[in-house]
Amino acid sequence: MNLIRSLWCVVLIAWLVSGCSGITASSDGPPPVTDARQTGPLPKDAVPRAEARSKYGNPKSYVVFGRRYYVLSSSRGYEQKVIASWYGNKFHGRRTSNGETYNMYAMSAAHKTLPLPTYVQVTNLENGRQAIVRVNDRGPFHENRILDLSYSAARKLGILSKGTGLVKIRALQPGDQPGTGQTRLAAGAGKGVLNKVGIYLQAGAFSLRENALRLKTRLASMTRHRVWIQKARTAAGNVFRVRLGPMQSVADADQLTREMLKLSMDLPRIVIE
């Protein structure tokens, strides 16, 4: 019985990984220029509805590229500011992690740990545009990315040309009203006026200031970016967070992350403020 259960787990993980959006996305891109849907009307937002958890794509945990991810038991209350990317033509028509077929023209997305399916409202923090998508896939498996949007969702949010965007994700339950005005935007945002948002890397968090100072000193010797300690009060007591930034771009954050990993440092956490 244990052998059968183990074999079933292997099959399930193989199914999950086969649908991951960001495994080999280096040659991905938009639809062919001959496809009229590339510039046609955008689809309507996904409408949150009650759905059973997918039979596939929801193991307790799974491993991709040597890193283990733990699937959340619920999406209720989930809210986070992250870097989003998008995936398109390369994966169009392929199977998603929950066994559906990926349609780059649908309002959908991939996420590493949210239950499948989950509906989320996505707000572009730089221009105020919003979209509601249905998460039905796993990915993107890039150090600093959390959400992979479909082509149409990325187009609606205005991040196609940049490839990435700074966004706020909020999970929606059936009957929830999409939020409006939740993000403080610059005057005219949503009409092409960019809002200033900072990208930071959090390299560690410590209960002892001395440990934070040691990490700060090490980081300061290897980067031109500002390294500082943020003191915060939590239920467990004081915490000292070592942060770098703000970064000038997502590319800067990616480069510094790679340098830290080469030095066997822990993977830093992206913070958007």
Image (cartoon, rainbow, N blue to C red):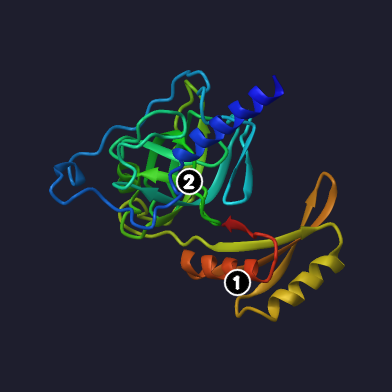
Q: Would residue 24 be found to the left or right of residue 81 on screen?
A: left
| Residue 215 image label | none
Q: Is residue 159 above or below residue 91?
A: below
Can you tell which quarter of the image residue 273 is in? bottom right
**Quadrant of the snapshot with the N terminus:** top right
Q: Which residue is mark 1?
A: 259
Along the line of sight, the residue nearer the viewer: 255 or 11: 11
Residue 168 at x, y percent in the picture: 50, 46
Q: Earlier in the sequence, mark 2 or mark 1?
A: 2
Residue shown at the point (74%, 72%) measured from the top left: 216
Residue 129 at x, y percent in the picture: 37, 46
| Residue 4 visible here | yes
Q: Is residue 98 above or below residue 110?
A: above
Residue 118 at x, y percent in the picture: 49, 30
Q: Would residue 20 be found to the left or right of residue 192 on screen?
A: right
Q: Which residue is mark 2?
A: 147
Residue 24 at x, y percent in the picture: 42, 52
Query: How crowded is the residue under tag 2: few (<14 C-alpha within 10 Å), some, or many (20+)?
Result: many
- C-alpha separation, residue under disc 2 versus residue under disc 1: 23 Å
Residue shown at the point (55%, 30%) measured from the top left: 12
Judged from the image, the secondary structure of the residue bearing numbered disc 1 is: helix
| Residue 179 visible here | no
Along the line of sight, the residue nearer the viewer: 12 or 211: 12
Judged from the image, the secondary structure of the residue bearing numbered disc 2 is: strand
Q: Would residue 162 be found to the left or right of residue 214 on screen?
A: left
Residue shown at the point (46%, 42%) measured from the top left: 20
